[in-house]
């Protein structure tokens, strides 16, 4: 069968029944052709929905009205559940150090949820102009112990941004995720020349974001690299299979791998001291315990339903 490689497109935005699709494999990405598409009526993608980040074949291309129809969906590598985005290669968990203030338990939930996707996870700390350099170094050290080399950003100083930019250009599809008001869209506006998406100051009293970004949207920064802006939200206690949780914490994983921790039980969740050799004196251990407990509660609730 003939493949329509030249009509291969990338879904960059989705609203109601419509999709914005960029034609891929174009020579000059800055002049990329963007089409407003619907899915061909006769086509049923086995009840699969199409998401931002999906690769699709488009046909019936009308160059004048910039319209086309989606006729097939390529197999996807992965699908993030919230927000729904396909084919992610890198997740950048984004938090402000102030305004809204840093909530370590939230940072942890976002990180672990991202780790459960099995893609590369990074941490970005914004608004470092609002703290002292001493505090910034303290935070860098804290997250190093969590297993992350955080990138610290500061609107006043674009040097910090350059390294991130170089990094993003080496990744395929990076997504920025975090609570509302931390500066995700501000960051994208600085990264992409000409982009002026809406941003808004955090509310003055409670220093919380105003949910300014409403849709997931994908932007290209080169022919090979894309970044995704997402609406901010707070992460609920996790719904991850508890057997996988220990491996998602580098402090535990490292011990199990490097030091051949031998616990009494083969699938030890490292909750009790008796028979468990894990060194539990690390900062995230209480978060880990809470997560296991709430995952258990969730599991048993679902069993009773
Ligand atoms: N002081 C300071 N303010 C910043 C920085 N980055 C962003 N802001 C401000 O933070 C506010 C919120 O930024 P947004 O980019 O709208 O935040 P967001 O994460 O996209 O928020 P949602 O779209 O609601 O999820 C804006 O007023 C920005 O000007 C920074 O590095 N320093
Ligand atoms: Mg935003
Ligand atoms: Zn154990």
Image (cartoon, rainbow, N blue to C red):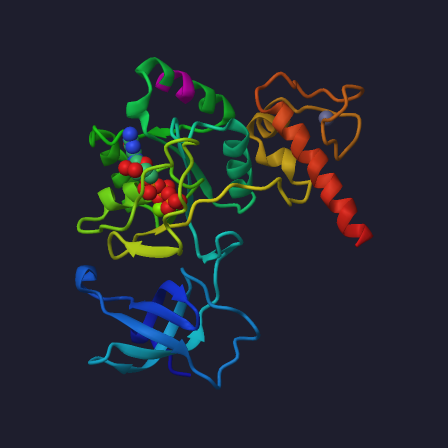
Q: Is residue 70 within the magenta segment? A: no
- Where does residue 85 sit, x and y in percent of width and height? 45, 56
In this view, 5 is above or below 124: below
In this view, 6 is above or below 158: below
Q: Quadrant of the N terminus?
A: bottom left
Q: Quadrant of residue 277?
A: top right
- Where does residue 287 sit, x and y in percent of width and height? 61, 28
Q: Nearer the viewer, residue 110 or 25?
A: 110
In this view, 44 is above or below 271: below
Q: Is residue 163 left or right of residue 207?
A: left
Q: Is residue 137 within the magenta segment? A: yes
Instruction: Name the magenta segment's main secondary structure.
Output: helix
Q: Nearer the viewer, residue 37 or 131?
A: 131
- The residue located at (79%, 54%) in the rendering is 305
Q: Is residue 92 left or right of residue 47?
A: left
Q: Quadrant of residue 20?
A: bottom left
User: Does residue 296 appear in this view?
Assistant: yes
In this view, 164 is above or below 223: above
- Where does residue 86 sit, x and y in percent of width and height? 45, 58
Quadrant containing ligand 3 reads top right
Q: Nearer the viewer, residue 169 or 181?
A: 181
Q: Is residue 177 left or right of residue 128?
A: right
Report the residue that reaches farthest toward the bottom: 42
- The residue located at (44%, 56%) in the rendering is 87
User: Does residue 255 appear in this view?
Assistant: no
Look at the image and give the residue range highlighted in magenta. 136-140
């Amino acid at each position: 069968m003939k493949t329509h490689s030249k009509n291969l497109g990338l879904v960059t935005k989705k609203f109601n029944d419509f999709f914005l699709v960029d034609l891929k494999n174009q020579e000059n990405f800055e002049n990329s052709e963007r089409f407003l598409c619907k899915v061909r009526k006769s086509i049923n993608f086995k009840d699969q929905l199409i998401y931002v980040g999906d690769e699709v074949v488009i046909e019936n291309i009308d160059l004048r009205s910039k319209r086309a129809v989606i006729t097939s969906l390529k197999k996807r590598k992965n699908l993030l559940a919230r927000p729904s985005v396909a084919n992610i290669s890198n997740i950048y968990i984004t938090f402000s150090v102030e305004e809204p203030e840093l909530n370590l338990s939230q940072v942890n939930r976002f990180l672990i949820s991202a780790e459960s996707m099995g893609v590369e996870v990074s941490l970005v700390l914004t608004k470092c102009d609002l703290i002292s350099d001493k505090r910034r170094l303290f935070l860098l050290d804290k997250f190093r112990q969590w297993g992350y080399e955080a990138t610290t950003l500061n609107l006043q100083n674009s040097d910090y941004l350059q390294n991130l930019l170089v990094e993003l250009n080496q990744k395929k599809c990076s997504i920025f995720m975090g609570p509302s008001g931390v500066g995700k869209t501000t960051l994208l506006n600085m990264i992409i020349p000409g982009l002026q998406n809406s941003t808004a100051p955090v509310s003055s009293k409670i220093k919380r974001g105003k949910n300014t970004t409403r849709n997931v949207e994908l932007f290209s920064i080169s022919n090979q690299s894309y970044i995704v802006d997402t609406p901010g939200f707070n992460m609920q206690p996790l719904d991850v299979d508890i057997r996988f949780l220990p491996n998602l914490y580098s402090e535990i994983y490292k011990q199990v791998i490097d030091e051949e921790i031998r616990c009494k039980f083969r699938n030890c969740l490292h909750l009790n001291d008796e028979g468990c050799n894990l060194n539990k004196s690390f900062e995230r251990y209480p978060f880990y315990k809470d997560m296991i407990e709430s995952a258990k509660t969730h599991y048993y609730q679902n069993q009773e339903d």
